[in-house]
Image (cartoon, helix red, strand yellow):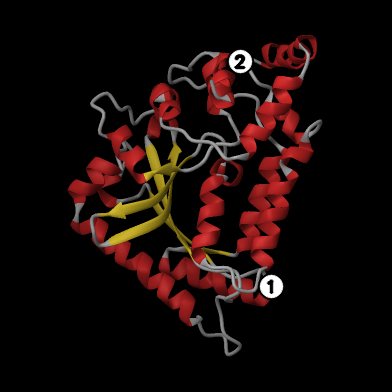
Amino acid sequence: MSLQTTWKEELIPWSLLSYERRDLLKPIERKWGSLLAAPHVNESDLHQFIAEHASLFFGQTSVVISRFDLGSDYQVDLVIATDEASNGISYNLVEIEIPSTPPYTRSWNPSARLTHAIQQVLNWKTWLKRHRGHVRRFFPSDYRGWEEFTNFSYSIFIGRRTSPAMTAKRNELAREIGIEIRSFDYLTSLLRDRISNVWDSTNPTDGGSPNLATRNRLANPFTQAYTWRAWKELVDQRHFECVHFVPKNAWELLGQRTYSVEFDTFLSWWGSLPRRSKWRHISRLFLRD
């Protein structure tokens, strides 16, 4: 029986990773920094790293889908599905570029790479409006204003942080076109914040909260992005719930999850602890719940 099978029988205080065993997550941050600094890093390598550590970038209850197909025409790098409680599900479609290309040229014009990324996102927008059947099936939501796509947002990650003037210019363009444009340093900030604030369990909601053990499993910080195939299987289920969709689809979500290789390292350490030491840590979960 694998380590990743046996852990499901236990409560695990994930917050240990933010203080006592912070060393188990710091290598992930260092790898990310090295990746950004590499002179010839490509989009595929960046995408793979982000997808493998999805929960550490986008939160332990965000559902991140990697390489999301829009028919046979386009493929979105990442789609982040956010539980908006009784408002349904919102979706953020993400285009990943590279950190070495600045969004603007020295003459203050959008770079060729940014221009291409913007056009890609505009193509997605047009495609979605023309294929509402695909949207109803694979972007389910009870969000008010769904027909007007008010629950959709779009993001481009490109370049590094430069001068305040360049950032202001980028943000002005983002407001004009309705597409968020972020640097890779923003992703670094997200990663550091998540590493510093790992949750022991997902928060209870008024949508029929799962028990503590299930919420503890949902909070696993080593969760990878879901594949496009896994997401299709999830939303195609007849009983899929759009309202409070994380707690109400908890078992289905957990059944499709995969975890990064660092999870095995953590489990090896956790499994080596004496029972008394484990219980001392686990007892904190009951006090917080």
Residue at image coords 75%, 35%: 18
For the image, the number of numbered tags is: 2
Residue at image coords 44%, 70%: 176
Give the quarter of the image for residue 268: top right
Confirm or deny contact between disc 1 and disc 2 (CB under 8 A).
no
Give the number of the mark in front: 1 or 2. 2
Q: Nearer the viewer, residue 192 or 27?
A: 27
Q: Position of residue 272 (x, y in %)?
A: 75, 21
Secondary element at image label 2: loop
Q: Is residue 212 left or right of residue 238?
A: right
Residue at image coords 55%, 59%: 46
Q: Looking at the image, can residue 29 be seen?
A: yes
Tag 2 or tag 1, which sits nearer the N-term?
A: 2
Q: Is residue 169 left or right of residue 152?
A: right
Q: Which residue is mark 2?
A: 10
Q: Which residue is mark 1?
A: 164
In the rendered image, the vertical position of residue 158 relative to residue 80, given as above or below: below
Q: Position of residue 219 (x, y in %)?
A: 57, 29
